[in-house]
Image (spheres, grey):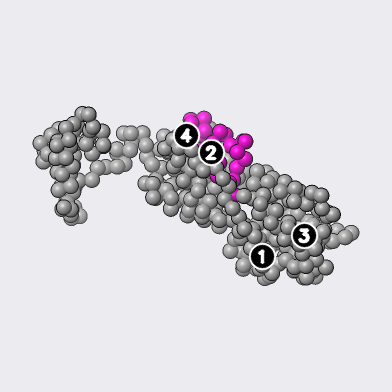
Amino acid sequence: MAGPQHEAGTPRPTSRDVARAAGVSQATVSLVLGDKWRGRVAEPTAERVRTAARQLGYRPNLAARNLRLGRTRTALLVVPALTNEFFAHVHTGAARVAARHGFGVLLYPSPEGPGPARDPFDSARASLDGVLASSMASQVLATIRGDDLPLVMLDSDPARSLGAATVNLDLADGMRQVTEHLLALGHRRFLHLAAAVDSWTFDVRAGALAAALHGTDTAVRRITAPLTVAAARTAAEAALATPGPRPTAVICDDDFLAAGVCKAARRLGLRVPEDLSVTGFDDLTLATAVEPELTTVRLPAERFGERGMEALVAVVEGRTPEAAPLPVELAVRDSTGPAR
C-alpha cells in the first residue's frame, strides 16, 4: 500500500519516526534500509521496519548516505569544448546512461580547448566516483589518476591511456572507406588537410590514410590547419594555388576543414566536385548545411557517449568493459565525384 503524501511545508518522516513506529532502534532502521541487516537483524524485525517505512512514506537521504559510504554517484566528463556539437552529443549519450545507473554527470569543457588543461577538481576529487575524458583534453588527468580515481578514456591510444580503460571509434576504418571511395572514382592525386592538433585521434587518421594508399599509384601531399573554417580556407587556397599538378581530391580530418576547402575552391574558380572532390569527417550538422553537401564519415557521437559511460560504470563496479571499437560509416553526398 502506498505511503501517505506529504504536503509542502509538512516535515518529512525521519528514521527516528520509522524506529518509533517499528519499535526498534535507529541503528536497526539504518541496517535494514541500508540492506546490511542479514545476520544482524531477524527477518520479522526487518520486515516490520520496511512496513513502517512504507506506511510513513519515508525516503532515506541518499546524498547523506552516499557521503557516509564515500560514494556520491557523480562522474566527471572532460571534453575539449562544447562549441563542437560532437562533444555535445557525447554528453547527451553519457548523461542518458548515467541517469539509468543513478549517476550525475559534471561536465568540464577545457578552457584551453584541445591540448593541455588544468585540473578543475584539485580540491574536490573526493566528490567524484569516476572520470570519463576525451583524449583531446587528457593532460588534465595526470594528477587525478594519481589518486586512483576510476577513469575511462574516449578516443585514446590504449597503449598510452594512463592504465585506464578506453572506448574508441573505428576511425581507421572510416579513413579506409573514404580512400576506397575516392580511388573507385578514379582519383590518384590527393591533398590531405590534417588538423593542427597533437592528438592520437588525428594520428590514427593520418596513419590509416597512408596505409590505404600504400602500394597504389597515387600521390598525396599533407598540410595542416587549425580546426576552423577560416584557417582551412587559407591553408587550402595556398595549397591549391601552388604551381604543378593540382590534386583532384582533398581528404579532410573533419567537416570544418572540409567546409574551408570548399570556400577556397570557389575563390579559385574551382567547382566541387567537378574540378575537386572534398571529403570531411564527423558528419556534423555543417555537413548538410553547405552546398554541395559533404561526403563525410558519420561518427555515432551519442552512442559513443553511451558506451563511454557504460564502461565507466563497469569500472566503478569492478567489471571489465567492452573493448571493441564502435563502427563508423561513410555518408556519400555531392561533394565527391569522378576525377577529371
Q: Residue at x 69, y 56 (%)?
A: 177
Instruction: Determine whether, in the image, residue 141 is placed left or right of residue 313.
Output: right
Checking the image for residue 149, the label placed there is 4
Instruction: Give the labeled residue for mark 2.
Output: 165
Checking the image for residue 332, the label placed there is 1
- Asked if one can make out residue 263 in the rendered structure from this viewpoint, the answer is no
What kind of residue is marked 3?
A: Leu
Q: Residue at x 16, y 40 (%)?
A: 47
**Up/down of 16 relative to 250, above or below:** above
Earlier in the chain: of badge 4 and badge 2, it is 4
Say whether marks 2 and 1 touch (CB < 8 Å): no
What kind of residue is marked 2?
A: Ala
Q: Residues within 10 Å of mark 2 (few under 14, many from 20)?
A: many
**Helix, strand or loop under label 2:** strand
Whether residue 294 is in magenta: the answer is no
Q: Position of residue 45 (x, y in %)?
A: 14, 36
